[in-house]
Amino acid sequence: RFRYYQNVCAQSYSYAWWDWARWEREIDWMALSGINLALAFAGQEAVWQRVYLSLGLNQSEIDAYFTGPAFLAWNRMGNLRGWAGPLPRAWHLKQLYVQYRVLERMRSLGMIAVLPAFAGHVPQGVLRVFPRVNATRLGAWSHFDCTYSCTYLLDPEDPMFQVIGTLFLKELIKEFGTDHIYSADTFNEMRPRSAEPAYLARVSSAVFRSMTGADPEALWLMQGWLFQHQPDFWQPAQVRALLRAVPLGRMIVLDLFAESKPVYPWTESFYGQPFIWCMLHNFGGNHGLFGAVEALNSGPFAARRFPNSTMVGTGLAPEGIEQNDVVYELMNELGWRHEPLDLASWVTRYAERRYGAPSAAAA
């Protein structure tokens, strides 16, 4: 059903400075490659700024929260705040323009554009405006101290969770329209304050309800990275609680690193939620002539045959792009296949297609 593309981190590692001309090239490549589901994240900070101002935050509080463009991937997931910020007004306007064009092009080519939703993280200014709000200060992330991390996560049962989440998504839909699929990642590389399944279920339910409060047809697209990144925390009971708090079929999980560390086998196919088998391939936008081609050639088919499989597609989820085309072309082709390829034969034909003619010297 789905042939997915993009990684939330690539928004910073690869796309941060793109203009419309570069996006147009990428979207055309996506169409030629059969991609039908992709992220469309540009311009969201302009909408968030509008929402925060309407709630009573001042501009200095907003400026202290947003990171610079190259770090927004982690600001959006609650990992960072303020680093290399603030964002100038001209940047907001440019990103709105880019997003209008991106969405127009994607939709004209039959693609589903995934918009961002509220994951629960808020600027510190929210605590000033609403002093009784119940929020947890998260821990430091990566090698950043609390000057630039330790963001605030609203309690899932605090009324402001639904107020802010629904208000943002309504504003976003009014600005950009919708294809009814939304991305949100609450615990990206961050340990929740409690391992109690009931708490995790409340968080998941709150995120989803903030989506359906704005769009009754909402479907949540979530990265499954957290489960394999912190497996000591995300035991079966915790994973099940987070996933099953959303009605079955109203969430799609990206099994992000499935070519190396698939999550679906030890979660009973994500406890019934649909998932997309993804190739991550690289971290940090690093380049390299590598790729787990044997795993790519077998993994999606094994996932389809898995007992009670809920696999609904394949995907490309690199943290950085513009490197080692062959593994991406292979992965795209596998989305159309019913069985593994003869890799040696496929690579030979790929080289001939790419360079135009066979070479005796390469035989």
Image: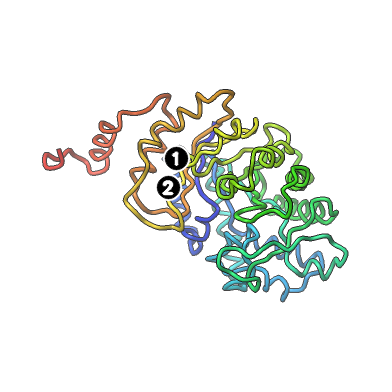
Q: Where is residue 188 in the image (x, y as percent from the top left)?
A: 61, 53
Q: What element does badge 2 sit on? A: loop
In the depicted structure, whether residue 327 falls above or below residue 2: below
Q: Position of residue 214 (x, y in %)?
A: 77, 46
Amino acid carrying label 1: it is: Glu
Q: Where is residue 326 in the image (x, y as percent from the top left)?
A: 33, 43
Apparent side of residue 49 relative to residue 312 in the rendered image (left or right): right
In the rendered structure, which disc, 1 or 2, sits on the residue that comes first in sequence?
A: 1
Kindly identify which numbered label has been placed on residue 259.
Answer: 1
Q: Residue at x 72, y 76 (%)?
A: 60
Kindly identify which numbered label has been placed on residue 247.
Answer: none
* Residue lying farthest to the bottom in this orientation: 60
Q: What element does badge 1 sit on? A: loop
Q: Nearer the viewer, residue 83 or 201?
A: 201
Apparent side of residue 228 relative to residue 196 in the rendered image (left or right): left
Dot 2 corresponds to which residue? 281
Q: Residue at x 71, y 70 (%)?
A: 62
Label 1 crowd bin: few (<14), some (14–19), many (20+), radius 10 Å: many
Label 2 crowd bin: few (<14), some (14–19), many (20+), radius 10 Å: many
Q: Is there a contact, CB below 8 Å, between mark 1 and mark 2?
A: yes
Q: Where is residue 36 in the image (x, y as percent from the top left)?
A: 52, 39
Q: Which of 309 and 324 is in front in this view?
A: 309
Apparent side of residue 286 relative to residue 350 in the rendered image (left or right): right
Amino acid carrying label 2: it is: His
Name the quarter where the C terminus is drawn.
Answer: top left
In the depicted structure, whether residue 215 falls above or below residue 340: below
Apparent side of residue 291 relative to residue 318 in the rendered image (left or right): left
Image quarter of residue 201:
top right
* Residue lying farthest to the left in this orientation: 360
